[in-house]
Image: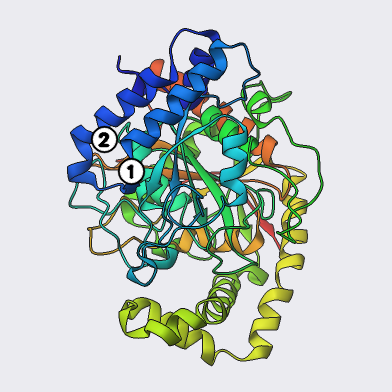
């Protein structure tokens, strides 16, 4: 097996134990990029010599017996909205072509402190919004990889790098992870600092991660959790051992709340059928829970906040080069300017009471079970519909996309788990349990182990969250 196929945690363990070197690992990743990226276009910036110099320094550090971090010598991709002091950061926009920051974003600095090799910058859609970039889906180049963290998801899926970071203001981690068939984890809002990254919305922006399994995503997120005085939404809390907790057995078998959410009518038939099988396979471990009418307007409230904040944060770029912005982005900025202040304030005020309502649900269930996207990846002309992510991003709760199912055409279908705000470790442990359990069902040949194609409907008992 080529080393580039190793997961992040396995690669880190191999380097730590001396079974492989960073130079070997980074070299295999670069060879894989040379083989496949001409078709996928996941990278916005890649300096092979610089990557190898970082790997050589990591190996030299370890050979001299110096202390190593949890990601020592492991290559990581960085979405091109996070500042890197040694590489350009261009936000996917020609307005910022050649921009060279003077220092790293907080998240990047913490990755370096953990020993990671910053392999390069991955493609983002323009200003991390909806206009598609050049990246293609590794499973079928005629389909979108999702957005806006397109390159990060595609690079991990295509075995070019074992892990990558992205961001989510609507569905920009969960959706591309679902479309590309990798694990995508969006932690609780404010858990990972965002200073030094493009800001679209302080209320909605999250740092997220991509890995090949739950343990990889947990480790990558864990090393970035920190208090940052430059990010007012971070808090001085103890760093949780995500990777240890994620790999542990839950004290009791988890219970899942199947939530259709207010946008269930946008789910495609294939996704509905696949979820019917999944809910049926989980049996008594899963109950259907209906969100009350107070949740119905949450997607619209999310949109109001996002558009108003974008109009404010991108106003200078619009003024100096609006003719070079995409039509989609210009229209969003215009809508943001037109929203009423009262509507914006009401949208902000709606977050806390809805989280309180969800708290009662999480007293009884370990995670919400819901689609990550309406269906499989659509055609390349779009980044896909983020509707199944909007509510959870609005509430700032942790969410993870798991590649548990496939469409009839062979494209991945993502399952999204959502957890209680601030209880990310429990969500990761539950996700790890679910993947193992589904694997056992398939291995046993169980008739209703999840796969697309059943016409059965969820028969779980329905409850309601008001």
Q: Is residue 212 above or below residue 320?
A: above
Sequence-first disc among 2 and 1: 2
Q: Nearer the viewer, residue 413 or 42?
A: 42
Residue that carries the numbered disc 2 in the rendered image? 33
Mark 2 or 1: the one toward you: 1
Q: Mark 2 falls on what kind of element?
A: helix
The residue sitting at 51% across, 54% down in the picture is 82
Task: Pick the quarter of the image with the C terminus.
Answer: bottom right
Picture quadrant where residue 325 is located: bottom left
Asked if the residue under mark 1 is in contact with the one under mark 2, i.e. CB atoms within 8 Å, the reply is yes
385 vs 338, left or right, is left
The label shown at residue 46 is 1
> Between 364 and 455, which is closer to the camera in this rendering?
364
The chosen color scheme is rainbow
Which percent across, then down, holds residue 81? 47, 58
- Residue located 72% across and 42% down the image: 423
Instruction: Give the residue at x 57% y 71%.
Output: 302
């Amino acid at each position: 097996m080529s080393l580039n196929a190793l997961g992040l945690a396995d690669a880190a363990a191999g380097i730590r134990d001396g079974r492989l070197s960073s130079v070997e690992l980074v070299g295999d990743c670069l060879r894989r990029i040379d083989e496949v990226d001409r078709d996928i276009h996941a990278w916005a910036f890649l300096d092979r010599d610089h990557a190898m110099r970082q790997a050589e320094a990591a190996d030299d550090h370890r050979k001299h017996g110096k202390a190593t971090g949890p990601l020592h010598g492991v290559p990581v991709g960085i979405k091109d909205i996070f500042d890197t002091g040694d590489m350009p950061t261009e936000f996917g926009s020609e307005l910022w072509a050649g921009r060279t920051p003077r220092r790293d974003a907080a998240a990047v600095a913490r990755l370096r402190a953990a020993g990671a090799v910053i392999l390069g910058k991955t493609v983002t859609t323009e200003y991390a919004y909806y206009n598609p970039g050049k990246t293609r889906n590794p499973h079928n180049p005629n389909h979108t990889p999702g957005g806006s963290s397109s390159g990060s998801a595609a690079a991990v899926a295509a075995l070019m790098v074992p892990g990558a970071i992205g961001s989510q203001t609507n569905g920009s981690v969960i959706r591309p992870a679902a479309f590309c068939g990798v694990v995508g984890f969006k932690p609780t809002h404010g858990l990972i600092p965002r200073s030094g990254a493009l800001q679209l919305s302080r209320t909605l922006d999250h740092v997220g991660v991509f890995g090949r399994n739950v343990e990889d995503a947990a480790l990558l997120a864990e090393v970035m959790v920190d208090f940052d005085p430059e990010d007012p939404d971070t808090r001085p809390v103890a760093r949780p051992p995500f990777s240890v907790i994620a790999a542990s057995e839950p004290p009791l078998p988890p219970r899942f709340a199947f939530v259709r959410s207010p946008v269930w009518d946008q789910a495609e038939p294939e996704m509905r059928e696949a979820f019917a099988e999944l809910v049926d396979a989980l049996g008594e471990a899963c109950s259907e829970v209906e969100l009350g009418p107070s949740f119905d307007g949450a997607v619209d409230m999310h949109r109001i906040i996002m558009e108003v904040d974008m109009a404010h944060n991108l106003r200078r770029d619009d003024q100096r080069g609006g003719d070079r912005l995409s039509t989609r982005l210009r229209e969003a900025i215009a809508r943001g300017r037109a929203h009423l202040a009262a509507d914006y304030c009401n949208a902000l005020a709606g977050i806390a009471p809805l989280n309180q309502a969800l708290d009662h649900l999480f007293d009884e269930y370990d995670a919400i079970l819901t689609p990550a996207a309406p269906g499989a990846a659509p055609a390349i002309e779009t980044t896909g519909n983020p509707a199944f992510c909007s509510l959870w991003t609005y509430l700032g709760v942790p969410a993870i996309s798991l590649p548990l199912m496939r469409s009839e055409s062979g494209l991945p279908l993502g399952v999204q788990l959502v957890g209680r705000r601030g209880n990310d470790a429990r969500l990761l442990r539950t996700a790890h349990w679910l993947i193992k359990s589904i694997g056992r069902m398939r291995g046993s040949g169980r008739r209703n182990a999840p796969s697309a194609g059943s016409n059965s409907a969820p028969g779980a008992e329905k409850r309601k969250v008001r």
